[in-house]
Amino acid sequence: MSNSLKTVAILVALLLATLAGRALVAETADDAEPRPGYMIVIGTGVDSPRMGPYAAATVPLLLEFGGELLFISEEHGAEILEGGPFESSIRVFRFPSLQHARDFYYSEAYQREAIPLREGLGQLDVIVSDAFVPDPRWLQAGD
């Protein structure tokens, strides 16, 4: 998949997550809650039936770090309105903060125990980002 298509997929996933109202935003308050962190996983050619052991090892770790699955698309399940083709699947996870997402990914248990269980079962691109829900006025037409 080209880098531009990956970028589009990432932006779409973040937009969907933020517009769904799953994130809380604190504009500039010093005591503000951290912004949620998102993990976007783009899978290409993943052998889903053989990913069971990886999923079984990963789900408890996701929960431990506060991860929540927001949505999954199947391969070929995304409708491309511009660009393409896009034959990958997308998974978007929400964490309490960007640091929680990083801590999950870099945890010893995930790196040493879970990741080896998916080797050779497809290509995964893993991206983390923070995000926020824009002020609704940003989306309104000007007067």
Image (tube, grey):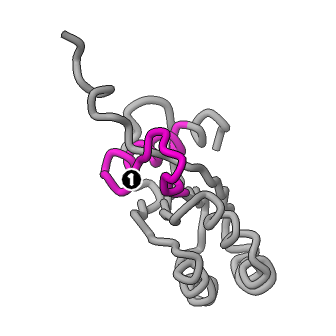
User: Dot 1: few (<14), some (14–19), or many (≥20) neighbours within 10 Å?
Assistant: some
State whether residue 29 is above or below residue 105.
Answer: above
The furthest residue to the top: 143
Chain part drawn in magenta: 8-37
Q: Mark 1: which amino acid?
A: Leu
In this picture, residue 52 sits left or right of residue 73: right
Which of the two residues, 118 or 19, is positioned nearer the viewer here? 19
Magenta span includes 12? yes
**Image quarter (top left, top right, bottom left or bottom right) of the C terminus:** top left
State whether residue 137 is above or below residue 93.
Answer: above
Q: Residue at x 32, y 26 (%)?
A: 138
Q: Residue at x 44, y 54 (%)?
A: 76
Determine whether the residue tagged by mark 1 lies in a helix, strand or loop: loop
Q: Position of residue 99 (x, y in %)?
A: 65, 61
In this picture, residue 110 sits left or right of residue 129: right
Q: Position of residue 16 (x, y in %)?
A: 37, 47
Which of the two residues, 16 or 7, is positioned nearer the viewer here? 16
The furthest residue to the left: 143
Q: Residue at x 56, y 49 (%)?
A: 130
Q: Which residue is mark 1?
A: 24
Which of the two residues, 21 or 122, is positioned nearer the viewer here? 21
Magenta span includes 11? yes
Q: Position of residue 9 (x, y in %)?
A: 51, 43
Number of marks in picture: 1
Q: Position of residue 19 (x, y in %)?
A: 33, 45
**Image quarter (top left, top right, bottom left or bottom right) of the N terminus:** top right
In this picture, residue 142 sits left or right of residue 113: left
Q: Residue at x 57, y 83 (%)?
A: 64
Quarter occupied by residue 10: top right
Quarter occupied by residue 121: bottom right
Which of the two residues, 109 or 114, is positioned nearer the viewer here? 109
